[in-house]
């Protein structure tokens, strides 16, 4: 049987999942009745957020001009946090549908994804979706695609995924334009792992694309990078339900089940081959997932610690790119330091935690990973601000820089340039996508991007600006660790790393906020922001003068009891910094100041 392997690349909400549904329906892989809305995003949360998080593959059969084809659609995640997974999925395809919304036009992610597809030498089929919309502007969008992506306007396939228009034409184009896979069935087994997920009954399910050779049920295989060997217990394809088979040959896409208990043992980008001398070479492009954003998660009630640990453990079974380790904080008690691929990944994990457990969480401000060269010549990798050594010990302080593509209507170019400059961005380029839209290219510190850049771009472009970024590397910068002291004691959870020039402003804002949240004590409380031993901002909570309980008189007795009960619970949530009692609410409000 002839095979075509392809993926759909698109900006969020341009209709990727809807188009995938229509393809499944058109090829008879699922009937209309079976078609649940957005079959490919099967996690409830994904549906809620409308973002495809994990890549998956579906295999369709279609007869075209008398010949039956196996059409494998590899679903790619659309968000920058999952760029590595996207690149591995692309490496398993010969072609890509480049899907653009007929009203929205080319967006930042469209460009970024199209460039990745070109780097992988994929045959690209330009597609304009949503032509049913009354305000669709397919001709202008076609011109934008020609200008920014080099698409031939005559080659663009116009469809409506929702209304099912143009689907037959699209399937014919897929068969005609995307080349068949080129591997050899007789060569040694060489297959790419492009995804995995966890099944409570079967363990890890590994998604592979066979590049060369054949894999058979019952055979011994070896994961070349992980260096582990397993027996193939079951294999098959998703059509779209798991359907077992006995062999997968060069060019095909499918899954393997090998009694692997943990997803940590399956590495995306790894190569599957046979044990011993017959093994093929490992495929290139493998790397480990890099966690770029860290934060602390603490149960707001200390008694929930073990419940939180269990919930995090359960989550990491399904998501090996998320990691966590225990952390203690004077201010927040026992909790965990958690590492994520990016901001969105962090939000997703948090939401899942909230949905799947009852633990009430306190989250510290997210920070990026820093590198520090000490005076003694050591290189430290820093995941939390408290670990930054004192200023006197630091030779060089480095931070991650990302290259941002920002697509904006031309009216807002000035506002976005100003924003990027304030965020210490360095302009790298500017291109016009058409008469009304442009793409700005900036190198910006990742810390500034995760701080608020995305929201700020959205608000200064009335929601029309889109942002995409990729890691460039680490660069030295004038960074400092700013601490918050309460009566001379450092509050560990409130330390942050920031640019020296921003420290004064941020320090003043935090101490002011904290002052307003700390109750009066019998003594004066000094709230300070400091860099090393140098204090840069100070506020004072003056000592208590009169008896506040004197105010409690009269009133309804049951209400008073309730109040007392509440106060008792509140007391549990008080944390002591030195001899100063600070409520958890105070920490939380300061953490949300950023
Ligand atoms: P992510 O999973 O978030 O990346 O989004 P997606 O690209 O998969 O988009 P999805 O298929 O979820 O579609 C986004 C929205 O556009 C949904 O509300 C769809 O109903 C709508 N949509 C998709 N295709 C069409 C179309 O052809 N016409 C119209 N009018 N709406 C469409």
Image: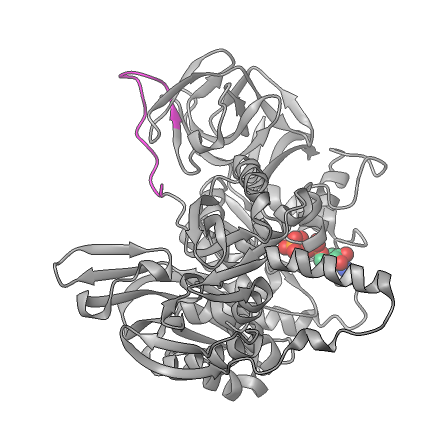
Considering only vertical position in the picture, is 27 above or below 465? above
Q: What stretch is highlighted in magenta?
A: 272-287
Q: Nearer the viewer, residue 299 or 53?
A: 299
For this view, does 486 lie left or right of residue 533?
A: right
* Residue 172 visible, this angle: yes
Instruction: Residue 573: give x, y in percent of width and height.
Output: 59, 57
Magenta run includes residue 190? no
Q: Nearer the viewer, residue 186 or 281?
A: 281
Instruction: Residue 532: give x, y in percent of width and height.
Output: 27, 72
For this view, does 211 lie left or right of residue 348?
A: left
Magenta run includes residue 281? yes
Say which residue appears at 37% left-offset and 43% top-offset. Answer: 288
Work out which residue is located at the far left of the displayed protein and give it. 376
Quadrant of the rendering where the N terminus is positioned: top right
Considering only vertical position in the picture, is 31 above or below 158? above
Magenta part mainly helix, strand or loop?
Answer: loop
For this view, does 459 lie left or right of residue 449?
A: right
Work out which residue is located at the far top of the displayed protein and give it. 218
Q: Nearer the viewer, residue 489 or 129?
A: 489
Instruction: Residue 3: give x, y in percent of width and height.
Output: 56, 32
Quarter of the render that holds ligand 1:
bottom right
Which quarter of the picture shows residue 502? bottom left
* Residue 159 visible, this angle: no
Instruction: Residue 220: give x, y in percent of width and height.
Output: 42, 14
């Amino acid at each position: 049987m002839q095979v075509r392997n392809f993926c759909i690349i698109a900006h969020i909400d341009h209709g990727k999942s809807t188009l995938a549904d229509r393809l499944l329906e058109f090829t008879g892989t699922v009937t209309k009745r079976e078609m649940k809305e957005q079959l490919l995003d099967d996690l409830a949360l994904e549906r809620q957020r409308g973002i495809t998080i994990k890549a998956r593959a579906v295999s369709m059969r279609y007869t075209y001009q008398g010949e039956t084809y196996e059409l494998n659609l590899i679903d790619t995640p659309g968000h920058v946090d999952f760029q590595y997974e996207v690149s591995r999925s692309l490496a398993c395809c010969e072609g890509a549908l480049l899907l653009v919304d007929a009203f929205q036009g080319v967006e930042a992610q469209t460009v970024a994804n199209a460039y990745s597809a070109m780097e992988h030498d994929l045959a690209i089929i330009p597609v304009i979706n949503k032509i049913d919309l009354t305000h669709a502007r397919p001709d202008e969008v076609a011109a934008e695609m020609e200008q920014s992506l080099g698409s031939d306007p005559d080659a663009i396939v116009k469809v409506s995924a929702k209304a099912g228009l143009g689907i037959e034409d699209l399937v014919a184009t897929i068969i005609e334009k995307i080349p068949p896979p080129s591997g050899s069935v007789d060569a040694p087994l060489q297959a790419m792992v492009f995804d995995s997920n966890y099944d409570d009954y079967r363990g890890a399910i590994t998604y592979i694309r066979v590049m060369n050779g054949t894999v058979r049920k019952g055979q011994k295989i070896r994961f070349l990078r992980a260096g582990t060997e397993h027996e193939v217990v079951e294999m098959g394809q998703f059509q779209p339900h798991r359907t077992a088979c006995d062999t997968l040959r060069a060019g095909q896409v499918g899954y393997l089940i090998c009694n692997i208990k943990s997803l940590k043992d399956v590495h995306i980008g790894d190569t599957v081959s046979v044990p011993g001398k017959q093994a093929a070479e490992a495929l290139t492009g493998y790397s480990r997932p890099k966690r770029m954003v860290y934060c602390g998660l603490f149960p707001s009630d200390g008694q929930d610690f073990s419940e939180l640990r269990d919930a995090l453990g359960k989550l990491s079974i399904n998501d090996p790119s998320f990691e966590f380790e225990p952390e203690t904080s004077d201010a927040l008690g026992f909790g965990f330091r958690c590492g994520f691929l990016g901001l969105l990944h962090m939000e997703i994990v948090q939401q899942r935690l909230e949905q799947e457990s009852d633990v009430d969480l306190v989250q510290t401000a997210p920070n990026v990973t820093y590198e520090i060269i000490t005076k003694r010549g050591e290189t430290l990798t820093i995941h939390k601000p408290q670990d930054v050594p004192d200023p006197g010990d630091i030779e060089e302080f480095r931070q991650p820089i990302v290259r941002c593509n920002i697509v904006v209507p031309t009216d807002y170019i000035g506002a976005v340039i100003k924003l990027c400059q304030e965020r210490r961005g360095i302009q790298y380029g500017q291109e016009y996508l058409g008469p009304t839209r442009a793409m700005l290219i900036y190198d910006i510190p990742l810390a500034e991007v995760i701080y608020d850049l995305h929201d700020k771009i959205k608000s200064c472009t009335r929601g029309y600006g889109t942002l995409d970024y990729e890691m460039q590397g680490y660069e030295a910068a004038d960074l400092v660790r700013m601490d918050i002291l309460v009566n001379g004691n450092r509050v560990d959870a409130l330390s942050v790393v920031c640019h020296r020039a921003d420290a004064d402003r941020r320090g003043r804002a935090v101490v002011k906020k904290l002052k307003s949240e700390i109750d009066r004590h019998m003594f004066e409380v000094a709230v300070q922001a400091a860099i090393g031993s140098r204090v840069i901002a100070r506020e004072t909570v003056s000592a208590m003068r009169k008896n506040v309980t004197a105010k409690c008189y009269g009133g309804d007795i049951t209400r008073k009891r309730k109040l007392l009960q509440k106060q008792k619970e509140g007391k549990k949530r008080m944390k002591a910094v030195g001899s100063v009692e600070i409520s958890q609410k105070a920490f939380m409000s300061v953490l949300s100041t950023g």
